[in-house]
Image: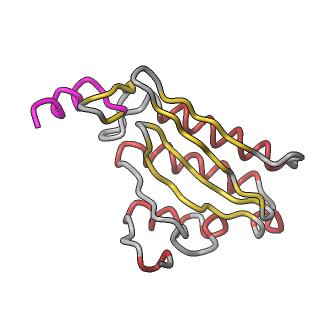
Amino acid sequence: MSSQEFPTDPKIDVLVNRFPRLFRGRHPRAWSDLPDGWTGVADRLFNDLDAMMSDDEAATFEIVQIKEKFGGLRVYWELDGQQTMVIDAISAHSVQHMENSPARPTALFGRVRERVRQAAQQAATTCQKCGSEGATATRSGWVVTLCEACRAKKVRE
């Protein structure tokens, strides 16, 4: 199934149009979805990534997928054929996020990886529904990052 066969998220389509160098002018090749509350986090991330790359560097870069997973922002990307690989493990008390990177990452790879980590850390304290200050918690078996008001609504829903 190609990325064109996946339903598209209008919020991601906005990012594709705003940052065509990072997305190679198309929707990510893996199904992607961005929670409403994290659009600002994603916009700042992609603005910073776009600014840190020359045209030649951007030509070897691609956003592969954007999504929420276990209450956290996940941005998967590729640079010079080297793709990020992430493994998440969840237990009753925590989510462990492990990332594998190339044996000899370039300086640009390191800068991109660090900026993506910063965005994930910011999302971990940002409500995925409304964008207010939030915290990650487990509710009914789901790990979510919500503010107090959205958490109260979720409990009532």
Asked whether residue 38 is in view, the answer is yes
Q: Is residue 78 left or right of residue 151?
A: right
Rendered position, 102 above or below 120: below
Assign the C terminus to one quadrant of the image: top left
Identify the residue at horizontal 81%, vertical 61% (top origin): 54
Asked whether residue 107 is in view, the answer is no
Identify the residue at horizontal 54%, vertical 65% (top origin): 18
Identify the residue at horizontal 77%, vertical 67% (top origin): 60
Q: Is residue 47 left or right of residue 104?
A: left
- The chief SS type of the magenta part is helix
Rendered position, 116 above or below 133: below
Identify the residue at horizontal 77%, vertical 43% (top origin): 111
148 within the magenta span = yes
Q: Which residues are magenta?
A: 144-157
Which residue is more in the foreground, 64 or 119? 64
> How many marks do you count on the picture?
0
Q: How is the image coloured?
A: secondary structure
Residue 129 x %, y %: 30, 41
Which residue is more in the foreground, 59 or 52? 59
Which residue is more in the foreground, 130 or 71? 71
Q: To which quarter of the image does residue 142 belong? A: top left
Residue 118 x %, y %: 62, 35
127 within the magenta span = no
Q: Residue furthest left?
A: 156
Q: To which quarter of the image does residue 93 belong? A: top left
Residue 127 x %, y %: 36, 34
Rendered position, 85 above or below 13: above
